[in-house]
Amino acid sequence: MTPSEKIISFVRNAADTALFFAVLAVKENFRNYVKRAGAIEMAPSGEILLLANGPSLASELPAIIERGDHQRCDVLAVNYFACDERFETVRPKYYVLSDPTFFRHRCDWERVEKLYARLNERVSWPMNLYVQYYNPDRFDYRAMLPNRNIRIVPFHSQVYRGFPSLEHWCYRHGLGSGNFGSVIQNGEFIAILLGYRTLHLYGVDHTFFDGLTVTHDNELCLRTGYFYDSRPQLKRVVLTAVDPPKPLTMYEYLKDKCELFRGHEVLARYAADCGVRILNHTEASLIDSYERV
């Protein structure tokens, strides 16, 4: 790297670092809520199963239950897993919701209400529910979930940018997040922060390019499928983080997925620095950042 390139890199990192801490100060704060809440009676193995909702979980979940992995390890689940009939068999200690869909009355709200009702009615064991601290709509999670078995724990959602030397320090203090585009990445970030030594990933197909199509009206659509769906559904690809939800172009969609896969590389480096193993059990997964099983 030439002297001029070093100067440019330093200035860019200095600006990004300053902006990161400024955004935290204005939008969020510097409290490590995840660490404060702590783990719930961590399994002696120090291992945790992270269950994403990819199609492969339909075949992986029965095997997990048959082997008794959910009893030997702790479990973290995400999004609509609670709507599956095996939710009470698996009894996840940790649950993560990070998409704006879950705190904004806009997209699929009737389905979201059913999820909250399911959690409220069925959770009879201690559970930490992790949600984004940044909540511009001031959504009241406790009003939706009066069940006192559920502890609501906020986490920071600002992605770290800046000096590489500060990156892992921020992560260890609960600043920054795994919010690179997939809720399971937030799950990985939280599991590492809680002190788990081995993370087992299931249902992380990340096949975001299968069934991708553009209509005659130039609307980008994706035929999505989850383990709990009877058949994949063709839906418009929209950004739910803005109001109203914004349809994405092909360029915007691919750019978003590039950031997501970059996030897995970031998490892999952070896990290695913490002495944590991340094992990917999903056979057809497109993630190439973790050890495969």
Image (spheres, helix red, strand yellow):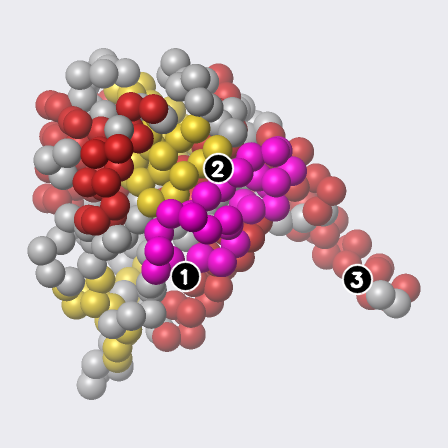
- From the top left corner, tell me how far across and down residue 187 is, in percent: 40, 37
- Left or right relative to 170: residue 236: left
Give the camera-side residue of 161 and 288: 288
Residue that appears at 67% across and 48% down? 162
The residue lying at 35 percent from left, 41 percent from top is: 98
Which of marks 2 and 3 precedes in the sequence? 3
- Quadrant in which residue 133 is drawn: top left
Q: Quarter holding the N terminus?
A: bottom right
The residues bearing labels 3 and 1 have C-alpha atoms spaced at a distance of 34 Å
Mark nearer the viewer, 3 or 2: 2
Task: Kindly indicate whether the residue at mark 1 contacts the one at mark 3 (C-beta within 8 angstroms).
Answer: no
How far apart are labels 2 and 1 at the CA level?
A: 19 Å
Q: Residues within 10 Å of mark 1 (few under 14, many from 20)?
A: few
Q: Residue 149: where, in percent of width, then height?
A: 24, 15
Amino acid residing under circle 3: Ile
Q: Does 125 sit left or right of 32 as displayed? A: left
Residue of label 1: 286
Position of residue 87 measured from the top left corner of the image (x, y, whole percent): 17, 32
Of the two numbered discs 2 and 1 in the rendering, the one whose residue sits closer to the viewer: 1
Q: Are marks 2 and 1 in contact (CB under 8 Å)?
A: no
Mark pair 3, 2: CA separation:
30 Å
Please tell me whether residue 143 is drawn above or below residue 192 in the rendered image: above
- Residue highlighted by disc 3: 8
| Residue indicated by mark 2 | 189
| SS for callout 3 | helix
| Residues drawn in magenta | 267-293
